[in-house]
Amino acid sequence: MSDEAEITEIETLPLDAWHRTKSARMVEFAGYHMPIQYEGIIAEHLWTRENAGLFDVSHMGQLMLSGEGAATALEAIVPGEIAALGEGRMRYSLLLGEDGGILDDLMVTTTPMGIYIVVNGAVKWEDIGYIRESLADDITLNHMEDRALLALQGPKAVNALKRVVPGVDALYFMEAASFLWGHTPLWISRSGYTGEDGFEISVPVDVVEALATALCAQDEVKPIGLGARDSLRLEAGLPLYGHDLDASLDPVEGDLTFAINKRRREQGGFAGAERILGALARGAAKKRVGLKIEGKMPAREGAPIFDGSTQIGVLTSGGFAPSLGVPIAMGYVTRDFAAPGKILEIEVRGKRIAACVSPMPFIPNRYHRKGKSA
Amino acid sequence: MSRYFTEDHEWIDVDGNNATVGITAYAQEQLGDIVFAEVPAVGAALKKGGDAAVVESVKAASDVYAPVSGTVTEGNDALGDDPALVNSDPEGAGWFFKLTLADAAELEGLMDEAAYKAFVAGL
């Protein structure tokens, strides 16, 4: 047989050497070598919930849409209100295929330079192709490969970051602005993927190492790996694309109807609107739910969910929740079984374990929202 | 008493016809924080290389294989309450199960400590 098997090169991130000097264990993720853990997932998870954790998320795609009518053009493939999104405001949205399936979940921010979009690393090339193809020629899509992305998350993130970059404490949850670090402009948003207060920082590749070092020099801050990023987001009830969301699922099934804004519900005009608005009106046949598992044995992605002898769903994420000390999971169940409090069974290695449908987040969010006392 | 090792990172202490099995310090280090361990039932008949126990880290579940064939005489119940014993004392209090050997000749294919060290160094 031929030996011409395609070897896909695993790429390195700008902070690769920095992670290794911090004794990170590196794994392959989304086509990159990435740190899975430094001192241990549980310790890193708990540190982030109590202090501040620095995450390197430079594998994610940072895109800039510019040109007259870019916001309206983007609305053809996302169900969010983008045209009326004020400068410095950001919104969680969904990239929709023609049939209303979710191609990715993303963050959209209106900036003075254009519409800034952050997409998942694992599907960024597909996203870029799809967005380009969907836009008129006079709208420019720039993939900002000269930028790295850091996330600083946790209740003490604001204290640590404002010492390094004064003024960031003026931002509220889902707001963003440009700040100067020395002579370097940083684009900083108050947002994240942990359920905690925190920030995401878009920084030029050539200074990211200096910034990461400056942040980790703060007493509150430690570097945190992908392992804890996953356990933190699971406790926060946040879906992970490629696991809890995929192209076969629509936003109603994904329990993400909050991302379909009022005007868009009334007017439609986005990819898959017929399916999605129909599902909004009639309810979806299945829905993403949280599950609290009885006992100590974790249940993982792919485990079937039963009501008696009938399989009524499947897990899409599952693991041990360090802040709760118990296993939790996320999955899809048919609509009759989606109500919180419903007791179901999950099959793990031929055994049934009891699980209770639970509201998400599993632990309360601690975002710094406007109009709420700190 | 002699200690042997497998390429799947189990250790086995053999004393006559009786043996104790666990996973190595290297294995627990690779797995990270252990949050759950499932040990075989007393009386279970294990086949060399077959599934014997399960160990779960925050991220994933992994099988522990039987280094040799035999019948389980005891599971380590302490792992139910404190699975982190596998991290803190993998080659002592974090043992998984005891068994009586079915065929002592099966030990011949296993590594001794020096060979296992060399094996791990090459990974």
Image: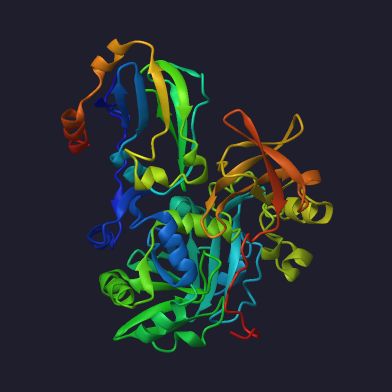
Residue A141 in sight here? no
Side of A55 relative to A76 (left or right): left
From the top left corner, tell me how far across and down residue B55 is, in percent.
45, 37
Residue A309 location, quadrant: top right
Residue A23 location, quadrant: bottom left
From the top left corner, tell me how far across and down residue B42 is, in percent.
51, 23
Foreground of the two, A231 or A145? A231
Which residue is drawn at the image coordinates 28% and 40% (left, top)? B26
Residue B72 position (above or below residue A358): above
Residue B96 in sight here? yes
Residue A12 position (above or below residue A296): below
Q: Residue furthest right?
A: A282
From the top left corner, tell me how far across and down residue A145 is, in percent.
35, 63
Which residue is drawn at the image coordinates 70% and 58% (left, top)? A359
Side of A366 relative to A212 (left or right): right
Q: Number of labelled discs? A: 0
Foreground of the two, B16 or A17? B16
Question: The C terminus of chain A lies in which quarter of the figure?
Answer: bottom right
From the top left corner, tell me how far across and down residue A84 is, in percent.
65, 77
Which residue is drawn at the image coordinates 72% and 43% (left, top)? A333
Question: The N terminus of chain A lies in which quarter of the figure?
Answer: top left
